[in-house]
Image (cartoon, grey):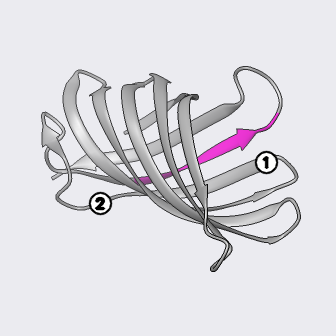
Amino acid sequence: MLAFGTIKLKGMDEKFDHLTGMTKSRVTHHYAGDIEAESKFECLSYEGSPGAANFVGLEYLTGRIGNRNGGFILQHIGSTKSGRSESTLHVLAGSGTGDLAGIKGHGRTTWHASGEDNSQVLLEYTFD
């Protein structure tokens, strides 16, 4: 099955570590579309050159996909360059709760620095 939608940034707290050059971020998102959910995302990023960064993170979503309610964790691996961010997604095995127990899948997100509706998510998923 495929789920498509948008992601809106609801809040962010970032802390830069001067020793390592890494930034730790705690972000809250709202998903709309085929995925209706709120999420908490924690990630580490490193800016190797001005305007370009790599990041990894885990995001816990609580809400609905189709007619199923529950929660699950997405692993993000991505990069940002010139105001555009992309990440690949993997549903962590065993993380599904409620009606989303047994979910597995993968997908991607894209973010653009311009515009109000500046993000998209695509998730291909199945259930055990």
Q: Secondary structure at mark 2?
A: loop
| Mark 1: amino acid | Arg
Q: Which residue is mark 2?
A: 92
Residue range highlighted in magenta: 106-113
Residue at the spot 74% in from the left edge and 65% down from the top edge: 53
Residue at the spot 37% in from the left edge and 27% down from the top edge: 37
The residue carrying pointer 2 sits among few (fewer than 14), some (14 to 19) or many (20 or more) residues within 10 Å by Cα, namely some
Q: Secondary structure at mark 1?
A: strand
Image quadrant in which you'd find residue 47: bottom right
The label number, if any, that marks residue 84 in the structure image? 1
- Residue 57, image x, y percentages: 47, 60
Q: For the stretch drawn in magenta, what is the main secondary structure?
A: strand
Image quadrant in which you'd find residue 67: top left
| Mark 2: amino acid | Leu
Is residue 63 left or right of 106 when viewed as pictured?
A: left
The label number, if any, that marks residue 120 in the structure image? none
Residue at the spot 68% in from the left edge and 74% down from the top edge: 21
Q: Is residue 76 above or below residue 20?
A: above
Residue at the spot 44% in from the left edge and 34% down from the top edge: 3
| Residue 30 is a magenta residue | no
- Residue 62, image x, y percentages: 28, 32
Alpha carbon of mark 1 to alpha carbon of mark 2: how far?
Answer: 25 Å
Is residue 10 left or right of 70 when viewed as pictured?
A: right
Of callouts 1 and 2, the N-terminal one: 1
Q: Are marks 1 and 2 in contact (CB under 8 Å)?
A: no
Nearest the viewer among 4 and 50 is 50
Q: Residue furthest bottom?
A: 19
